[in-house]
Image: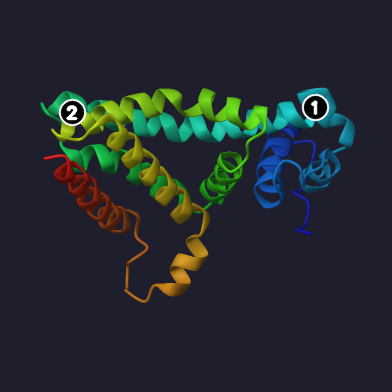
Amino acid sequence: MRQPVEYSSGRDPKQAILEAAEAVFASNGYAGSTTRQIAEEAGVNLALIHYHFSSKEHLYELVVSRLANDLNDARLELIRAAMSQSTPPSLERVVEAMVLPAIEYSTAADPTGQHYARMINQLASSTDERSVRLLSELFDVLAEEATTALEQSLPGLRRADSVSAYLFTLNICNQLMSNQERFAKLSTAPGSTEPKELADKVVKFLVAGIRSMAALNA
């Protein structure tokens, strides 16, 4: 087990719990995590978790929502900027709007981006009522705006194709975010893990695939 987060009278216990919960849920999943593990990781009394967050489920939803909303806000800002700058919007700009924030998030010094991606991957692979509800609550707005932008950026792209393109893009981003160590180990090209350079490669890869889908409808 990792060493517990240092706790002192000068540290906000709620923030310590949130950071610890993020790490524990990302490592063990919802079912495999306990509030006791989170309390130990945070270096706080177990009772404080129930005092501040009432239950493991409420804490989990809060952590996932906080992480997802931060990234969604960054993506939506870039999508809306792409939509406002040209008609039709640039396909490359729309795809980059989804890719670049994710890669920047995951290559920052702290592990938040990787924690987020692992939690979202766990959530997306689950079929229980809570997981289905959370995915809808967290991503429906992004999905609608992103798929609309994709359709407008590429005439001939059908709705089903734009949905596929959106899902493929998010899945690739999540895999890159959750496996940065693996990517770095396999890659030998100098600078290949720089966020903008990596994002450019991913965007080119995705744009080529999206254009090929539209071409099939011609």
Q: Is residue 18 left or right of residue 162?
A: right
Q: Nearer the viewer, mark 2 or mark 1?
A: 2
Which residue corresponds to the image point at 37% horizontal and 63% vertical from the top-left? 193
Q: Residues within 10 Å of mark 2 (few under 14, many from 20)?
A: some
Residue placed most toward the observer, 69 or 88 = 88
Point out which mark residue 209 bears.
none
Position of 203 relative to 190 (above/below): above
Q: Position of residue 166 (x, y in %)?
A: 35, 38
Question: Disc 2 and disc 1: Cα gap in Å?
Answer: 44 Å
Residue placed most toward the observer, 154 or 212 = 212
Q: Position of residue 170 (x, y in %)?
A: 41, 43
Q: Is residue 65 left or right of residue 10?
A: left
Task: Find residue 61 and report its image quarter.
Answer: top right
- Quadrant in which the N terminus appears: bottom right
Mark 1: secondary structure: loop
Q: Residue furthest front?
A: 217
Looking at the picture, which amino acid does disc 1 mark? Answer: Ser
Q: Position of residue 42 (x, y in %)?
A: 77, 43
Q: Can residue 5 be seen? A: yes
Q: How many marks?
A: 2
| Disc 1: which residue | 55
| Disc 2: which residue | 152
Which residue corresponds to the image point at 37% horizontal and 42% vertical from the top-left? 101
Return the disc, 2 or 1, that comes first in the chain's sequence: 1
